[in-house]
Amino acid sequence: MSPRLFALVPAAVAINLVVGRIAAELSLPVYLDTLGTMLVAVLTGLPGGVLVGTVSQLLAGMLSGYQWLPFVVIQWLIALLAALAASRGGFATPFRSAIWGAGCGVLCGLVSAVISFVLFRGVTAGGVSAIGALLRGLGLPLSTAVTSASLLTDILDKTVAFLVVGALLRALPRRILGRFPVAARAVGR
Amino acid sequence: MTRAHPFTGGAVSLAAIALALILPAPRGTIALYLAICLGAWALGAGRAVRLGLLAVAPIWLLLFIMHAVLGEAPRLVLPWGGTLSQPGVDWAVAQGSRLAAIVTASLAFAVRFDPHRFLQAAVARRWPWSAAFLLVATLDAAERFGDQARRLREAQRTRGLRVRGSLRVRARAVPALVFPLLLTSLTEADDRALALESRGLTHHGPRTAVDPPEDSRSDRIIRWGSLTVVVAVAWWRWIAA
């Protein structure tokens, strides 16, 4: 592992935790707890993103219970899609960021719904379960309620997250962006 | 417990999590949860029990609504009126106690975790140094960025940033609070990389622990005992099945 990645990984994991907390404090309907994973996947490539996602999930498990460890798959998926978006110039404009974010949200929502339904019967934590309960109260079957709630929250969350990362990358000075060739390609420079 | 080897707390915590998954619910998991709470109080990690309750209370509520209230038939008729789903109540109690046991065991380990002693123990055991350092550096970074986020929030509020109000107002606060943190992480990376390299990050080969924690006989007995209990319960469950 390169010294730069070694220095970036702890900061990115901390960003996942701290920005997630900021979003919760602002009572926003999004989590934004994968920004660090996306950022490192875009800056250094897929292995860095996967590493950040794994360490984030392990640390979150230590601080809030290891039952959510199966959701590490979502972190890997986000790293994969963010790295893919970066290689295809997916962060060049807000519109492209939003499209890639929505696509990431659909995939993550579907995988998350399967994990949530099979292992937890739809009750995980926070807003997504509350939406699931609301949809269940409206008469939807459990599987449909869980899938709909996951898709709704993940599409919104990942679209906003991709927009934030895209805006940051485009605002970066050339001096910093020049150190990360993959990121420069991601914003079309 | 302060003097216990850093791996002992982790081993006991992992054993408790494994037992929460293996033991029959709800009796076994409720008994385990109570035992974990008592153990945490006795070992000075009572804060973990309170934090655990705060973490699982919303999950208990959602389990009750989603499964007990909105669950499938057959329904239990309550003496004061209304009905609850029988399988939903069973699942809610089983899953609620299992999650509570896992959360409390994880938090009990977290509140007693000493990163410095863990790193020293990992070095002494010749564990992969990079993995141990990554965990410790991440905990340090989480604390540093948390402080920075608080200072940033106060600074931006004095400049007129609004963090309360409509969804639009709160959403507009995100860039002002998040972008500086993200930029800091990038600008700091090269300085930190240089510092790590100059301290032998890329050095391969054995390292010497400056202050290795003592691994006493009782520590080893507790760790092996934890593993034995998990294996015995798993075997008992397998036989019973």
Image (tube, rainbow, N blue to C red):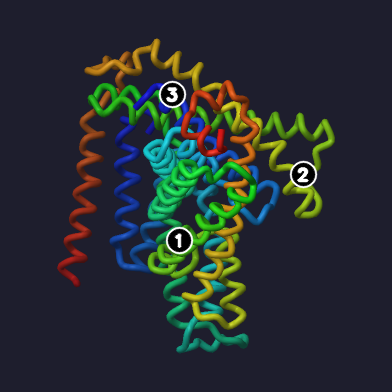
Whether labels 3 and 2 share one chain? no
Q: Which residue is drawn at 32% across and 18% down?
A: B202
Q: Which mark is residue B163?
A: 2
Three-letter code for the amino acid on which mark 2 is drawn: Val
Q: Mark 3 points at which residue?
A: A4
Task: Measure the C-alpha gap from mark 3 to mark 1.
Answer: 32 Å
Q: Which residue is drawn at 55% across and 80% down?
A: A140
- The residue nearer to you, when weighing A108 against B163, is A108
The mark tally for this picture is 3
Label 1, secondary structure: give it.
helix
B4 relative position to B195: left or right? left
Picture coordinates of residue B208, whole percent (x, y): 27, 15
Chain under numbered label 1: A
Residue A29 quadrant:
bottom right
Three-letter code for the amino acid on which mark 1 is drawn: Ser
Task: Measure the C-alpha gap from mark 3 to mark 2.
Answer: 34 Å
Of circles 2 and 1, the one toward us is 1
| Residue A108 at least partly seen | yes
Whether labels 3 and 1 share one chain? yes
Q: Residue A112 carries which label?
A: 1
Chain under numbered label 2: B
Residue B31 quadrant:
bottom left
Q: Residues within 10 Å of mark 2 (few under 14, many from 20)?
A: many
